[in-house]
Each structure stands twice: as structure tokens, then as C-alpha cells.
Image (tube, rainbow, N blue to C red):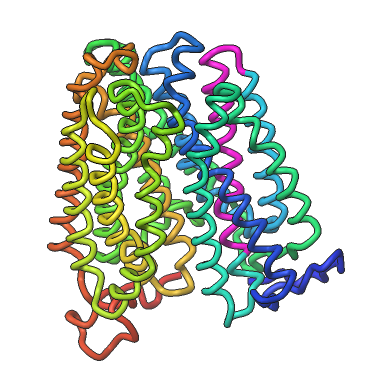
Amino acid sequence: MSDSRPQAKTGTRASPAAVRLSSAPGRWIVLACVLGSGLAGIDGTVVNIALQQVGRSLHVGFGSLQWVVNSYALTLASLILLGGSLGDRHGRRRIFVVGITWFAVASVLCAVSPSAGLLIAARALQGVGGALLTPASLAILQSTFNKEDRVRAIGVWAGLSGTASAIAPFVGGWLLAAGGWRWVFLIDPPLAIAVVTIAVLHIPETRAPRASQRLDIGGALLGAVGLGGLTAGFIAASEHTLGSALVSAPLAVGLIAVVLFVLAERREANPMVPPWLFRSGQFSATNLITFLLYAGNGAALLLLVIELETVSAFSPLMAGTALLPITVVMLLLSARFGGWAHRRGPRVFMAIGPLVCAAGLALLTRLDAQSGYWIGVLPAVTVFGLGLALFVAPLTATVLGAVPASRAGIASGVNNSVARAASLLAIAALPVIVGMKGSAYRSAAQFLGPFRAAMWSCAGLYVAGGVLAAMLIRDCAAVRPGTCTGPIALCGDPVLAGAP
């Protein structure tokens, strides 16, 4: 919804909810949102490529490298729903600009960090910025474009964001070769200046008139402590026994915080995660499947990049671009599979897609020191990308279709948080499960065995997700023929019809 306050006529700024995609203001708004959300997404890809160089430069073990990735993921996953609420309450453009600026300052702190501890702290600050700008970018598109152009604008945003992700490995690999890992973070501030300038000149301010004036700060803190405690315990387990206080204490704190989070959300008047959402069996099942699939996805992609550099002796540029087929396949096929799923129902796509991903990961277990790109890597990542293209769009549509349209924003936010939390916990826990310790990322002989075990474990997560989708996901037409406008529409969950 748009802000009821008068809008200043600055530059080419248009009125909220009246922008056309074909207009100059519309193009500026999409560009700002693509560049802004791209900052948060690209940084994750590039940092994965830089991890080996970071470890050698700062002389740290694999546990510290896990924290370099997970400190960002932790604050992002914990605060992204709160960031969306802040945008609704204080203005989407304002929070978007604050998030971009925060992210840029944190990126500079990452670049100048002299130690692993300071780098981890700066990455956590980056995650706070990402939690502010990510939900705001999509909310801006939803609230500024007119009804006829809104879906197309979001589609353009998604496509261009995918293209940005495809370019990231080239840029990241080149920066690593030319200037080292610190330059990976210094690319953010110039882009941030451009985004803030465009936003101030061309994006109208919007708010949600009925947004709650009460923020669920307690829920956000409990969520962060819960995820942080579990993450810290799992990472510490790679260096200490399970009976050690360094392992058991954070795990206990994390579990207690998760339980308190669930209890608090049930009693909170304006909860960050509304419990009524989970009255929908379709919504609950889809989020369970999301957790399994994105746990496998996060751990597999991180460890694959390290394998390519450590075992297969790829350069950082080659290791990054080796994943390019995943993005290309998704760009070419995701929309098409999403359209087929809308007409035929999501269950088949959500069941088959994860099994195809599992097959791609099984192919990756064949990698060794002699593996080349064309025979060893390309077939595996192409199959993996095909599996992602099959299930990602249907999964997202199923989440949105499981709740009333008026609550699609919070449903999407919860699902996004589930996906990020799953990746966070998998990256922390899976290396411990497969016996990946200390400096294993520096030795091909030490890394290869645990890597193969991890790929089989991730494949198992995908198989479990596919089986659950076949068992639990409903095609609307099969549940209540003739009562829905599309196979993924709200159907079979009448209890949500009067949801708040």
C-alpha cells in the first residue's frame, strides 16, 4: 500500500502505485532495486570463492571460515522479517537507503579487517544491512508500480538479479587474481553510492498505513540467539568433543532460545512469525521441504567451490565460473517450469526437481585431483541446475498460494528466513558430521573424503525433500476440483480464509 502523505516532486519521481514499467521512473526504480538486492546476493557468491585465500591470509582454520560465511547468514536470517516490518512502518525507500548505506560501510570494515575476528564481526554487520535492504527492494516494486505492471516489474527484477549473480563469479575471480580478497568487499561502496543516488532521486516513499507500531524485538533477539547458539555449537564440535563446554553450552543456549522463541511468538500480539500461518498444512509442508532443500543447497555449493580450488586445482576465477551453468539453466528454464506448474500443479515438479539435484550431487562425488571442467564438473552442475529450475518457482508459488493474497508478503518472508536458516545450520553442522576439521581445506588428501561424504549427505537431503513433496504437497485441482482459479491457489485450507 502507498503512503498517504504528499510526495515531493524530486527529479522524475512518480506517485506511488502509479508507475508504469515502460516509463523512465519505472526503469530507474527497477535498476535501483536490482543493484541493491544484487549487493546482498552477489556478496555471498564472491565470498565463497575467496574463502581459501582468506584462510591463508589470516592463518585460520575451517571453523573460522565457516563463521565468515555464517555470521552474515545469521544476522540476515534473524532480522530479515524485522527489516520488512521497519520498511512498512518507517518507509520502504528510507529503510532501503539505510540498508544500502549500512551494507557499504560494513563492506569497507570487511576489507580493512586485520584479523578473522574483526572480519567475522564486520560480516555480521553486513548481514544487518542485507536484512534491511532485501525485503525493502521487493516491497518497493509491489507498492510503486501500478497493478497491470507489478508482476512484470518483479519478473524483470528477478531476471536481472539472476544475470547479476551470473556475472559475480567473473568479477570476483578477477578481483581475487588482481588485488586479493580485500578487493572483493571494496566493489560494494561505489555500487552503493549509485543505488542511493538513484533511490533518492527516483523512488517515491511508501508505507503500509495499517502497519503495526509495535515491533517484535524480543522475537528477533530470541531467533538470533537460537540460531547463533546452534551455529556456534556445531562449529565448535569440529575442534572439540561433544562433551566439551565449548560445544554443549552454546547448543543448550540455542535450543532453549528456539523453544522460547516459539512460545513467545504464540503470545505476541504482533509476532514476527505469525503462528496462524502454520494452520495451513500446505504452508507447513512447503517450509519443511524448503528447510531440507536449502540446507543441501547451501552446504553443497560452499564445499564445491573449496573442492575445486583445493583438490581439482582450479583458479579462483575458474572455480567461480564453473558454477555458471547453474545460473544459466535457471534463467532459461525456471519461468517455463513455473508456468507449467501453475497449470498442472506443483507436486510433480517439487518431487522430481530435488531428485534431479540429488543426481547432480552424486555426479560431483566423482571429482578428484585429475578432474577437468568439461567432463568432471560441467555435466554435474548442469544436472544440478536443471533440478533447481524444476522446483524453485513451484515451491515459491506454493508458499504464496497457501495463504490469503493479503498475507503473501509475510508468507514469503517466513519462507525466505527458513531457507537462510537452513543453509546457515547446514554449513555449520555438515562439516562436523563428515569429519572435516581444522586445516582440511588446505589439503587435497584431507578434504576429498569428507567432501564426497558431504555430497552424499546433501543428496540425501534432496531425496528426502522430494519424497516429502510427493507425499504432502497437494495439487489444488485434485483436492477440490473447480473451486480454484489455479492449481496453486489457496485450496484445502479453509481455516485460513479469515486469517488476519
Task: Tell me if 181 is positioned left or right of 500 in this view.
Answer: right
Depicted 3 relative to depicted 418: above or below:
below
Quarter of the image where the N terminus is located: bottom right
Residue 485 belongs to the span the image colors magenta: no
Q: How far from the left and from the top, in percent, is residue 78?
A: 47, 41
The foreground one among 186 and 242 is 186
Task: Tell me if 22 is positioned left or right of 293 in this view.
Answer: right
| Residue shown at 53% from the left, 48% from the top | 216
Depicted 94 relative to depicted 378: above or below:
below
| Residue shown at 42% from the left, 20% from the top | 52
Task: Tell me if 75 is positioned left or right of 340 in this view.
Answer: right
Mark yes or no: residue 121 visible: no
| Residue shown at 22% from the left, 58% from the top | 353
Mark yes or no: residue 100 visible: yes
The foreground one among 301 and 172 is 172
Q: How far from the left and from the top, in percent, is residue 14?
A: 77, 72
Q: Quadrant of residue 442?
A: top left
The total number of labels drawn is: 0
Q: Main secondary structure of the magenta part?
A: helix
Q: How far from the left and from the top, in percent, is residue 352?
A: 18, 60
Residue 118 belongs to the span the image colors magenta: yes
Depicted 484 relative to depicted 162: above or below:
below
Q: How far from the left and from the top, in percent, is residue 316?
A: 44, 28
Q: Which residues are magenta?
A: 113-140
Q: Quadrant of residue 206?
A: bottom right
| Residue shown at 51% from the left, 46% from the top | 167
